[in-house]
């Protein structure tokens, strides 16, 4: 498993938590940051998956 996949999954989790905290507290900035971090993690995870596919893992 590629390190990008691991890091991407971590960012997705962190982004989800941040987004939820923003929703609960009513802080739209934190919520938006969480959504952005979650999207960044998804892209990184996909990139890592593509690298794994090319290596045949």
Image (tube, helix red, strand yellow):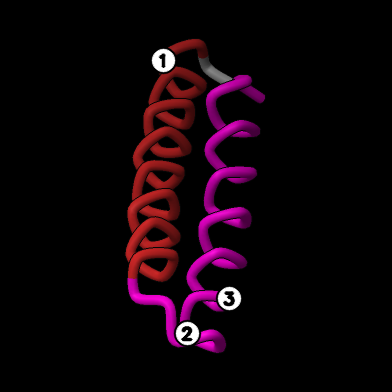
Residue to which mark 1 is pinned:
54
Of badges 1 and 2, the one in the foreground is: 2
Residue 9, given in percent of the width and then of the height, sits at: 59, 45
Marks 1 and 3, how far apart at CA: 37 Å
Of badges 1 and 3, the one in the foreground is: 3
Marks 2 and 3, how far apart at CA: 5 Å
- Sort mark 3 into few (<14), some (14-19) or many (20+) by Cα contacts within 10 Å: some
Residue to which mark 2 is pinned:
23
Residue 44, given in percent of the width and then of the height, sits at: 42, 33
- Secondary structure found at label 1: helix
- Sort mark 1 into few (<14), some (14-19) or many (20+) by Cα contacts within 10 Å: few
Query: Start and end of the magenta stretch?
Result: 1-28
Query: Is 36 situated above or below 52?
Result: below
Instruction: Tell me: 42 left or right of 2.
Output: left
In the image, is residue 45 part of the stretch drawn in magenta?
no
Residue at (39, 38) in percent of width and height: 46
Residue at (38, 28) in percent of width and height: 47
Instruction: Tell me: 30 left or right of 13.
Output: left
Total tally of numbered discs in the picture: 3
The main secondary structure of the magenta stretch is: helix
Residue at (55, 44) in percent of width and height: 11
- Secondary structure found at label 2: helix
Residue 36, given in percent of the width and then of the height, sits at: 33, 53
In the image, is residue 18 part of the stretch drawn in magenta?
yes
Instruction: Tell me: 43 left or right of 3.
Output: left
Marks 1 and 2, how far apart at CA: 39 Å
Residue to which mark 3 is pinned:
21
Label located before the other in sequence (1 or 2):
2
- Secondary structure found at label 3: helix
The image quadrant of residue 10 is: top right
């Amino acid at each position: 498993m590629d390190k990008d996949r691991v890091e991407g999954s971590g960012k997705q989790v962190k982004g989800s938590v941040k987004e939820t905290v923003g929703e609960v507290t009513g802080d739209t900035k934190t919520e938006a940051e969480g959504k952005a971090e979650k999207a960044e993690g998804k892209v990184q995870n996909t990139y890592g998956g593509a690298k794994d596919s090319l290596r045949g893992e």
